[in-house]
Amino acid sequence: TPSDIGVVDYVIVAVKQYQLSGAVSSIPPLIGQKTTVVPLLNGIDAHEQLMDVADSQHIIGGLSSLVSMIEAPGVIRHESQLQKIVLGELDCNKTKRVETLVQAWASCGVEAIHADDIFVALWTKFLFIASFGGVTSLCRGTAGEVLDTSATRELLRQAMEEVEVLALEQEIILKPDIVQSTMTFIEGLEPTATSSMQRDVASGKPFELEAFSGTIVRLGREFQVPTPVHGAIYALLLPALKRALTSS
């Protein structure tokens, strides 16, 4: 148990967003004066949720980029060469504790990056994963099918544009060509590629709708930014999420 383990140097939080509220209760016994809590979740606000159980000075920002799935209980299958970790302080300063962890991951062969601005990194991934995950889940299509159909290709582009505008409203400046460069990245995927969210939807498992389109819709209302595509994704997938949560 966490109490048996006691204080550690780093707590790496790597669960699905909808599992975070159930996981945070395990964290306090692990935290000492110099402990760093490292969220590697999808979405953009895990660090805020972790502040319910840890003081902000213990928390950094982080994200992971990889293709993996659960093969069996306790066994994770890594399915591609992509294995990237990006870390950074929430105040965007460079610190020894982040650099130490970056070097530890790099020594294991992982592409580890000490970000100049972790929020730009988080939103860059968020723009991709929320939009690609939402559109592929909604139309039950692969990357190739989404791109080969003009209507869904345009839907994907519009979904990414909504996220770009929301980032700008919060003074998070993404690359000027972020939507096109992300589209180019998706075009480079295998045509049969699917999103993890789509696979969860197809298998009847809970999925990260609230962390993706749900967050975008909420922020859109807060900043008075229209988000019609993500609004539709959220509304149309919400019954499936409720069904999955009830049966899980």
Image (tube, helix red, strand yellow):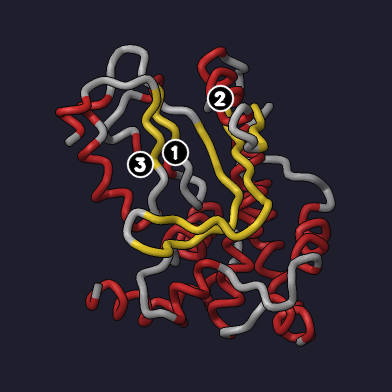
Callout 1 environment at 10 Å: few (<14), some (14 to 19), or many (20+)?
Answer: many
Mark toward the start of the polypeptide (2 vs 1) = 1
Q: Which residue is mark 3?
A: 49
Residue 238 locus on image (x, y percent):
39, 76
Q: Residue at x 15, y 29 (%)?
A: 3
Residue nearest the observer in this picture, 112 or 52: 112
Q: Nearer the viewer, mark 2 or mark 1?
A: 2
Residue 204 locus on image (x, y percent):
37, 79
Q: Disc 3 and disc 2: Cα gap in Å?
A: 26 Å
Q: Nearer the viewer, mark 1 or mark 3?
A: 1
Q: Which residue is mark 2?
A: 104
Residue nearest the observer in this picture, 158 or 6: 6
Q: Disc 1 and disc 3: Cα gap in Å?
A: 10 Å
- Residue 103 in sight here: yes
- Residue 39, disc: 1
Label 3 SS: helix
Amino acid type at image mark 2: Ala
Amino acid type at image mark 1: Pro
- Residue 228 in sight here: no
